[in-house]
Image (cartoon, grey):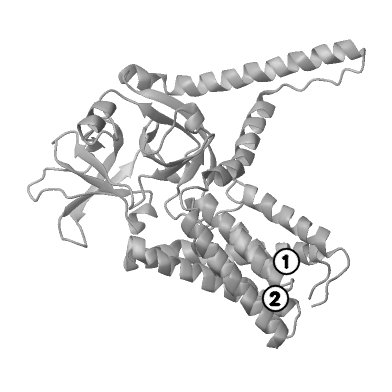
Amino acid sequence: MRGRDNSLKFLIITLITVTVTGVFAQGKTGFISGAFNLVPLGISNLTASAKSTPDSAENDELTLLKKENEELRAELIDYLDLQRENERLLKYFNISKQKPDLTLKPAEVIARDADDDFYSFTIGAGTADGVSEGNPVITENGLVGQVSRAELYSAVVTTILSPTLKIGAYDSRTADSGVVSGTAELSLKNRTAMTMLTEDNNVKDGDIVTTLGTGGIYPKGLAIGRVKSVDYSEFDASPCAVIEPYEDISKVTSVAVITDFSGRREVALRD
Amino acid sequence: MTETKGAVPRRILLGIELLIIAAFSNFIGLMPEFFGGRPLLLAAAALSVSACADTPTSVISGALCGALSDIISSGGVCFYAAALALCGYIIPELMCKKLNPNFYSALLLIFSASVALITARYAVNAFTYGFSDSAVLYFYHGLSKIVLTFTAAVPLYFLNRLIIGGGR
């Protein structure tokens, strides 16, 4: 009986500690999650370098030659890292050419949250690379999400399938505007919804939906997806359009973060 | 539960194992996806420890795994830390006092705890996403998460029994 009492006391003390830590550590645990993200980040970089490194026979000649060989190999890895970075940059070159006002930071997806049903993921770029909370995240095909938490070398991205993200958007053909936000049912089919459309909207299947650009969070004209169907919301019976993003959000492996764009600061200051 | 020889190094080893699992828990391609759900590795580790360790070790492991799970996922310490610490108390108590401490009891308790934990998680999510959305997600992702978390906990149970030193 005494053993059971002690166990119960132990549990109560642990629960109190957890609660107190939870209250006081809220928003201050970034360094811990950042530290844990360093492991997948390191493996991601290592595998990328290893994939590109050509096989070389082990040189067992003079130590000097070995050392020289090691130095050359290190240089080669640096070069291959740069090459990989260039390939990634090239991928986003067309976007930069079309929208020269965007400052892009390409990044690899290094982890995916198993506990999040809306496919949020972690990227290998953080505040040290100029990434900050609220930055839009894109692929060469369009918007995929927004940075919801930024650590030093990594950042967590909430996807456009999540109901917690609300994006001002408009139909690029008819200029009908609304709010793009996910729902559980649509997220299962890699789709999202554009709600708050007016009753007399002219949105049709196949229309392209892009960001509105008001609010200073997203630049204007970023592609979100294509209209699949127009229906009525089951919550408020207002018209809503089902949007299919251009990217399969659950399988994205490489993205770019928009760290800055013209109009961002102006809007932020005005607000 | 008597203190076995080398209990401190074994607990340190257990701590290292949990930290390694935490580092790889969300690594892409490491764990299979089944109907859109993936296993909660840290929860699986905590539950497997609970099935073969004494109550204090189990409660501490649960709180640690839960806190890490919360921090990596949401940046705060909340649901999993408390829920897994509670599981860390209930499982050894049931194992010792209500059931025969053997492999089948361990499997039964780990499965029941996986169901309770993930169901509770979706019940809490209902406050954020609404009841209908949370129910849809539970049906499509939650059930597969339960199966995968339980499946991941089985090999971890053997590993942890080896580390902790026989246990039950």
Q: Residues within 10 Å of mark 1 (few under 14, many from 20)?
A: many
Q: Which residue is mark 1?
A: B157
Q: Nearer the viewer, residue B142 or A65?
A: A65
Residue at (79% x, 65% y) in the render: B164
Q: CA distance from mark 2 to mark 1?
A: 9 Å
Percent across and percent down for residue B151 are: 64, 64
Q: Which residue is mark 2?
A: B106
The N terminus of chain B sits in image quarter? bottom right
Amino acid identity at mark 1: Tyr
Classify residue A212 by image quadrant.
top left
Residue B96, placed above or below residue A160: below
Amino acid identity at mark 2: Ala
Can the viewer see residue B93 in this picture? no
Percent across and percent down for residue A84 are: 57, 22
Percent across and percent down for residue B110 are: 64, 72
Classify residue A235 by image quadrant.
bottom left
